[in-house]
Amino acid sequence: MSAIFCSRRQALAGLFLTATGCDLFRSLGDGKSPLTTMLPPLEKPADKAGSPAATIRMARLEACIASRPLNDHKTRKLVWEELDESGLMAPEQRQRLNDSGFRLGVAGSSTPWAVQSLAEDAVRPAATDGTTGMPPVPANAADGGFGTVFTLLQGGQSYLEIQSDLDESRLPLQQIPQLATLRNPSQIRCVLELSVRDLSSDWVLLNLLPIIYSGSSTARLTIEQNAEKLPIRQNMLPLYEQQLQVRLLAGEIAVLGRYAAQDPQKWTVGSLFFQPYSEPGATERILMVRMNAIETLQGRSDPGFRPGPQAAGKI
């Protein structure tokens, strides 16, 4: 009798265990059981391959400042004959540029002979090689390079010094209204701010802003990261009315120089930058900027990255 009772209890217990076990496993599997709704959802591992890619474009540029004797045939005629000046801007804009004494032209991807020759003369060292008696060939002459190579991001800027430490006693500054108001016209420096306004996969839009620095160099105290620094500053006069823009494709060269007015006595801002003096023995300068290529850097952003406290300071 007791054996029959035990077998009945075992059978009943097995029946309940089987029924509740099936319901338990079914509830945990469908995610609708009260037991599973109280648990936090399972987090899937981050897919690093699917993280968004960060792309940065940079313009690789090359700049050269050539200096030639005054009234040199190459700088006055040959270079400008091979440049495109009419297709860069509207006629009225080009007229305002010429009235300011500036002249802008663009050479195609196949560099004209006069432009390449002028650039090679600028980078060729004055010293000669003792073995051959000839000037050594520049290191970048084999690949057609003709100047200093630098890279700019969109919104980045670089400063090209055209003239420095000009003698104000030899300059007719009173002929230019902007310069007549300078408080201290000593130690004049002429600088062009070159910045990247926009760029694409095959072109770059450059902005050129003439800036005149004058006055004695003075030390101004600044406090940065609990350290005292004494940078040297001069009076700065940006000439926004004379700023210009030029769009360059890969291999194209922008040439900026002085526009020779019909009146030889007329002295302009362009004269100050590229031909400040007119007496015998003076020189004339020309700026050449080539767009070599658009470089692209690709990386992947990390959503879980958090910068540390050191990222708030400057390097």
Image (tube, rainbow, N blue to C red):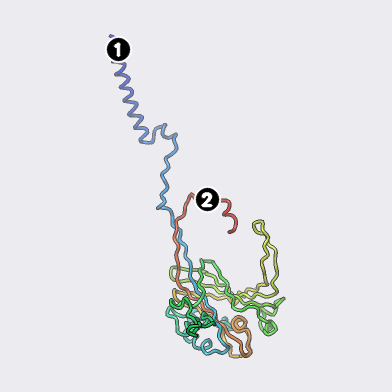
Q: Position of residue 89 (x, y in %)?
A: 51, 79
Can see residue 100? no
Residue at left offset 61%, top offset 79%: 163
Residues 65 and 173: in front is 65
- At mark 1, the secondary structure is helix
Query: What residue is rendered at 39% in x and 35% in y?
Result: 32
**From this viewpoint, which residue is outermost toward the top?**
1
Image quadrant assignment for residue 170: bottom right
| Residue under numbered circle 2 | 306
Q: Is residue 172 left or right of residue 254?
A: right
**Which residue type carries mark 1?**
Phe
Classify mark 2: helix, strand or loop: loop
Residue 287 sits in quarter: bottom right
Rendered location of residue 138, percent (x, y): 48, 78
Instruction: Determine whether label 2 and label 1 are within 8 Å by CB.
Output: no
Q: Is residue 69 above or below residue 229?
A: below
Sequence-first disc among 2 and 1: 1
Q: Amino acid at mark 2?
A: Arg
Taking the image as shown, residue 181 lies to the left or right of residue 251, namely right
Residue assigned mark 1: 5
Position of the N terminus by quadrant = top left
Q: Residue furthest front?
A: 131
Give the spatial CA distance, label 2 vs label 1: 68 Å
* Nearer-the-camera pick, 81 or 97: 81
Image spot of residue 33 (x, y percent): 39, 32
The answer to whether one can see residue 165 in this image is yes
